[in-house]
Amino acid sequence: MKSTTTPTDGKQQLGSHFDLAKDHLLAPANLDLAQLQSVLGDMMSHKIDYADLYFQYSRSESWGLEEGQVKSGNFAIDQGVGVRAVSGEKTAFAYSDDISLGALQAAAKASKAIANQGGEQSASSLIARASAPLYLGQDPIASLSADKKVKLLERLEAYARQIDTRVKQVTASIAGEYEVVMVARHDGVMAADVRPLVRLSINVIAEHNGRREQGSSGGGGRFDYSYFTDEVLQDYAQKAVHQALVNLDARPAPAGSMTVVLGAGWPGILLHEAIGHGLEGDFNRKGSSAFSNKIGQQVAARGITIVDDGTLANRRGSLSMDDEGNPTNRTVLIEDGILRGYIQDTLNARLMKMPITGNARRESYAHIPMPRMTNTYLLNGTAAPEEIIKSVKRGLYAANFAGGQVDITSGKFVFSAAEAYMIEDGKITYPVKGATLIGNGPDVLKRVSMIGNDMALDSGVGTCGKEGQRVPVGVGQPTLKIDARTVGGTA
């Protein structure tokens, strides 16, 4: 889905973002650029390869409605600075929730743990770097009063209950975040970003003849709460109720090897997990990915092109700059079945002698950055979705997924379908419940036999976990036909 707002002029955004970041992060502590440069210079005197300071201010909130009553409400403010020094493959990192010159100097001493291991470098003069603005820097938390946030959730619940009398329970939640970040690096780069983020979710339980099933929906992105119009609320309610009612009529899913058709949009989470993580630079540098040392090789069926794109306006996974101050990019990972590259941050790109792709991400100032996905999706093919369904004699159509598990080294995965149907003689016949997809990521890529022309991105609900850090992401794909896939079922 697209936001109802668009970014403004780049120069205006750069100036306002940088000034706002200085006001939030430096001014209260009486810090100036000369002091930051002095700290970086002291770190570089210990013969390291790279040093940076990551400042962050964030406000976040969430509201939860259950059965017409507010059951939860949370608000948090956090700020701090992370100080990092890199030498070879070693990283020294310290952080503080006190943004002050003393805290910076104390944290910078951590660089001595890896002193005399790097090159002979010095700190350059700090100069602001411009990044193309991908979203407005508005504060979503301030965009709506507390009372109106609750009323928004009440309207969402009412829409769901109006759709069908079998809807017995409704829970809804809304969350917003306002984040201001600034990066200062030893090479003189200084960059700032103002990041809004909102999400709305609904879960319903439908009951009929003693059987209870659930459905869920939602969305969001980098804008404020004004995005959630009545039309959007009705769409979320309709999708959640539809999923629950479909599952009320679902039969036990059969097990065995069969053709699998994945729907467009959110089912791209399977590609994200089973393939995307395996294309991150750190796993490939260490040789622990199923895709290690395979650049230039055929790793997928012809026609498959997968990109990671952090430059899409207003998307949940997008960033005007990554968490090292580098502009995000549209990076082609697999092109027509050929592996072209990996997702990289500065450390892994340097060690692998590959380009930086602008994919350094961290959960907060208290975490080190690592190569992470932004919006990862598979590009359109030429087949109409109806044509794909018609080509299947017997198989499973997975319209939506719940969750799954993946082993990065082997590429093996198990994913459970939240909404699935049987395909018989080229037609979608009846819904099934309890279907799981079992397989291997690289093997799945080679078994794709038809690619739809209906590529869609998810609605803005994805959060990715890696090594204990969680960051917002986006996924997407067109309808895909995968031959001879193992399906676990309950029948």
Image (cartoon, grey):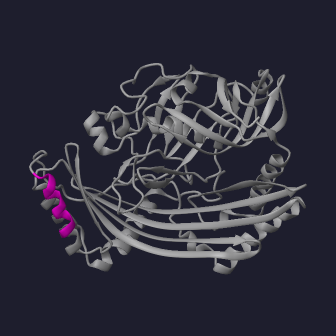
- Considering depth in this image, is 209 or 128 the residue closer to the camera? 209
Image coords of residue 282 (percent x, y): 35, 40
Q: Quadrant of residue 253?
A: top right
Residue numbers of the magenta segment: 106-115
> Is 271 on the left-hand or right-hand side of 103?
right
Is 107 part of what is drawn in magenta?
yes
Residue 351: percent from the left, percent from the top?
Answer: 25, 37
Q: Left of 186 or right of it: where is 241?
A: right
Mark count: 0
Given residues 432 and 198, the one toward you in this image is: 432
Q: Residue at x 72, y 40 (%)?
A: 399
What is the chief secondary structure element of the magenta stretch? helix
What is the x, y in percent for residue 229? 73, 64
The residue lying at 21 percent from left, 66 percent from top is: 107
Above/below status of 435 relative to 12:
above
- Is residue 342 in view? yes
Residue 52, magenta (yes or no): no
